[in-house]
Image: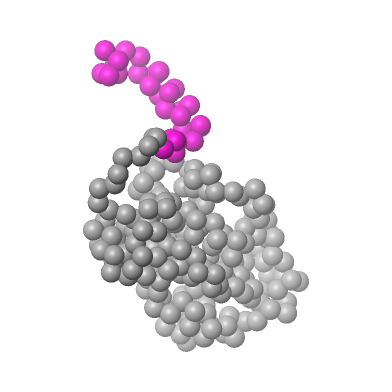
Amino acid sequence: MREIVLDTETTGLDPRTDRIIEIGCIELVNYVPTGEIFHTYLNPKREVAAEAFNVHGISEEFLSDKPLFGEIAVAFSNFIGDSQLVIHNAAFDLGFLNSEFDRIGFGKLPPGRAIDTLLIARRKFPGAQNSLDGLCRRYNIDISDRELHGALKDSHLLAAVYLELAGGAQAGLALDDAAAGRQIAARGGMPGPIGARPARPAPLPSLLMETENVAHEAFIAALGGHTIWKR
């Protein structure tokens, strides 16, 4: 089961006028990074918005000698092939990629090509902090060196988050395409292990963040004596 974890950085937020300036992709096979990557910076031929620069720190001067999207489009398309894409907030990245493809007359990527880890996280942790940073903190993934966003760096982090969302190390037990396909089909499109598991020698630590615990305790206290389980 080949998948591509993908992230982009852009000059701004509007795919109609803003452009992609960095693409980072990591190849996964059965949730495991293979070491194969696709990474490039791009010359957008326009200014980088100040708000965007504050997020990723990529300047127009740095990008001035980088290739145009049309120059890397074939290599990028060949790398992703027909594999499923794994993207955090897929609508954003697909919107920009399709705008770039449209400008050079390439076919667009359909929404069904992407597994959106933001939507998965929102279903799994409703009301929680489901940004990439928030999910990294929840799963104890080191982000100490992430002062600025970067497409390749964020793809590496997202690959680790995706493995956790898919069931952690247990997901790696699906070592062939057929088994992986059965897992995803049985979970209604959600990746991850299925079936009975042996009892754990010790319970897993809570995934709730301290701020969530404090908020929950405050909510329970506000209910006073109306909580059924304390009667």
Residue 61 position, x and y percent, is 76, 71
Depicted 77 relative to depicted 144: above or below: below
Residue plotted at (49% across, 43% down): 138
Q: In which quarter of the image is residue 183?
A: bottom left
Depicted 119 relative to depicted 2: above or below: above
Residue 91 position, x and y percent, is 43, 63
Depicted 4 relative to depicted 120: above or below: below
**Foreground pick, 172 / 48:** 172
Q: Is residue 126 left or right of residue 88?
A: left
Q: Is residue 223 left or right of residue 52?
A: left
Residue plotted at (61% across, 70% down): 22
Residue plotted at (52% across, 80% down): 76
Q: Is residue 95 left or right of residue 12?
A: left
Residue 222 position, x and y percent, is 39, 18
- Marks counted in the figure total 0
**Foreground pick, 231 / 26:** 26
**Foreground pick, 113 / 155:** 155
Main SS class of the magenta portion in the image: helix
* Magenta-colored stretch includes residue 228: yes
Magenta-tinted stretch:
204-231
The quadrant of the image that shows the C terminus is top left
